[in-house]
């Protein structure tokens, strides 16, 4: 009873503080107007709690009409739950909502019980958190047409599963579950030959589960159930969306780094591959890279973030040096050509990113190769080895063949059987 009295006192104070600004119930409904003053507000909730308290200690029952007005959920009794619903409706109306109390309760009691919205889920593993991107429902034109009162995500339940397979049998093991209401707006980018498509997204994070092992012979997935605010009413989606966790950022960020200045070029146009040359990251190139980092990197960026940002920047800001344009950079280092003169071909594009990663301490090498299977069209790209696993990197030039662009693609090493 002490706890109940405290709630009653708080509601009485709320009622007195807003008494000068009563909010009328929309339409002709009297549901919730249990004191008969023509409006539904905190005083009605306070009256319900007082009645519930007195009734439980031998007080007199309300009349049938008054009970019907106060019985928000049609349970046949008046209790603290009805007071909560009254306050919810009052909050909705006082912030611009226009629905009646009857409509409010209809939707609260199951009007959106089957609400579904499917979205791709992108999940990236960082050093201490998982960052998720889910389509922003508030920007969906179909949803806007169907629900003119407005729909937005207000919370996400995130369940993380370890996924294994043995003897053809798949198994999912729940390893963590967390709900967050800390949601920001962002986007994800899909690359096409004609240009980039930007999709608005909700962006949020949860803790990285301690049970996640990037070296394990399994995969991890995230299952997401959204809570939506529809015209002021919070509902939980009846469906979930899921996505496989991208472990590459965690692998890249946790790699053991060894500072060094040199990296090799290997010729894989022949079989077996052969060593061809060694390049060095000069002091002048380090100064260029340091200046680029000072201008573009932020304190919260991980190593993966920095590499990804640079990869994207090179793709979009360096002009492909065809014809006479190449003469302007023929004597430049890859770093100088791309970061200073902003011109290059495949050797400069991929070489500049490789040199930045060498400077950071990654085990990177360049490859001279044939682009076409018939042994034509010479090309250069980079590979990096982390914990014995090789990853291919291709920067490419913006607006060209969209396949010339990937970052940390796991592959079998191109140097198998190499002759040094």
Image (cartoon, helix red, strand yellow):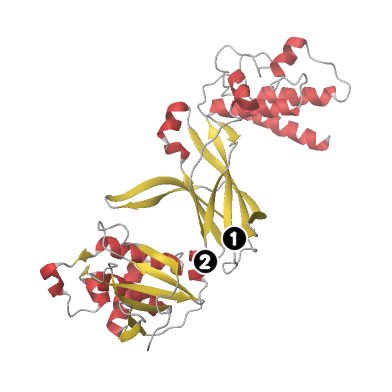
Image quarter of residue 237: top right
68 and 372: which one is in front? 372
Picture residue at 38% right of the left edge, 52% below the top: 189
Left-right relation of 197 to 255: left
Disc 1 residue crowd, few under 14, some 14–19, many 20+, Cα 10 Å: some
The quadrant the C terminus occupies is bottom left
Q: Residue furthest front?
A: 374
Picture residue at 78% right of the left edge, 22% below the top: 51
Labelled pair 2, 1 in contact (Cβ < 8 Å): yes
Left-right relation of 129 to 310: right
Find residue 173 and report its horizontal and vertical position in percent.
67, 55
Mark 2 vs 1, N-terminal side: 1
Residue on which disc 1 sits: 208
Residue on which disc 2 sits: 250
46 and 304: which one is in front? 304
Find residue 54 and report its horizontal and vertical position in percent.
83, 23
Picture layout, residue 37 above or below residue 107: above
Find residue 174 and report its horizontal and vertical position in percent.
67, 54
Q: Residue furthest bottom?
A: 420
What secondary structure is found at the residue carrying circle 1? Answer: loop
- Measured in 3D between alpha carbons, the distance from the residue under mark 2 to the one under mark 1, in whole angstroms, is 10 Å
Picture layout, residue 404 above or below residue 341: above
What secondary structure is found at the residue carrying circle 2? Answer: helix
Q: How many marks?
A: 2
Disc 2 residue crowd, few under 14, some 14–19, many 20+, Cα 10 Å: many
């Amino acid at each position: 009873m002490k706890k109940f009295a405290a709630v009653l006192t708080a509601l009485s104070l709320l009622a007195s503080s807003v008494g000068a600004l009563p909010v009328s119930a929309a339409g002709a409904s009297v549901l919730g107007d249990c004191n008969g003053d023509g409006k539904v507000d905190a005083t009605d909730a306070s009256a319900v709690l007082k009645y519930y308290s007195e009734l439980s200690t031998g007080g007199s029952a309300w009349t049938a009409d008054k009970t019907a007005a106060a019985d928000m959920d049609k349970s046949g009794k008046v209790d603290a739950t009805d007071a909560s619903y009254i306050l919810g409706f009052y909050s909705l109306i006082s912030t611009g909502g226009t629905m009646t109390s009857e409509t409010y309760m209809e939707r609260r009691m199951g009007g959106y019980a089957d609400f579904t919205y499917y979205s791709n889920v992108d999940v990236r593993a960082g050093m201490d958190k998982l960052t998720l991107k889910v389509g922003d429902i508030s920007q969906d034109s179909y949803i806007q047409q169907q629900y003119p009162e407005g729909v937005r995500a207000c919370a996400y339940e995130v369940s993380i599963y370890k996924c294994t397979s043995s003897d053809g049998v798949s198994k999912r093991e729940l390893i963590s579950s967390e709900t967050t209401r800390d949601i920001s707006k962002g986007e994800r980018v899909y690359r096409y030959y004609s240009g980039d498509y930007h999709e608005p997204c909700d962006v949020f994070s949860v803790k990285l589960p301690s049970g996640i092992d990037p070296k394990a012979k399994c995969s991890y997935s995230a299952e997401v159930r959204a809570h939506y605010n529809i015209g002021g009413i919070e509902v939980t989606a009846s469906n979930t969306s899921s996505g496989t966790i991208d472990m590459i950022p965690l692998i890249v960020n946790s790699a053991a780094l060894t500072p060094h200045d040199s990296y090799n070029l290997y010729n894989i146009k022949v079989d077996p591959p052969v060593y061809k040359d060694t390049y060095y990251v000069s002091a002048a190139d380090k100064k260029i890279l340091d200046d680029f980092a000072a201008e573009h990197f932020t304190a919260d960026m991980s190593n993966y973030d920095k590499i990804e940002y640079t990869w994207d920047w090179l793709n979009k800001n360096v002009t492909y040096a065809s014809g006479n344009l190449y003469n302007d950079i023929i004597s430049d280092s890859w770093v100088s050509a791309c970061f200073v003169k902003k011109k290059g071909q495949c050797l400069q594009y991929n070489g500049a990113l490789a040199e930045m990663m060498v400077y950071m301490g990654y085990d990177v090498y360049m490859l001279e190769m044939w682009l076409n299977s018939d042994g034509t069209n010479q090309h250069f790209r980079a590979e990096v080895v982390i914990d014995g696993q090789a990853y291919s990197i291709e920067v490419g030039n913006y607006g060209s063949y969209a396949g010339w662009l990937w970052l940390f693609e796991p592959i079998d090493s191109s140097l198998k059987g190499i002759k040094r």
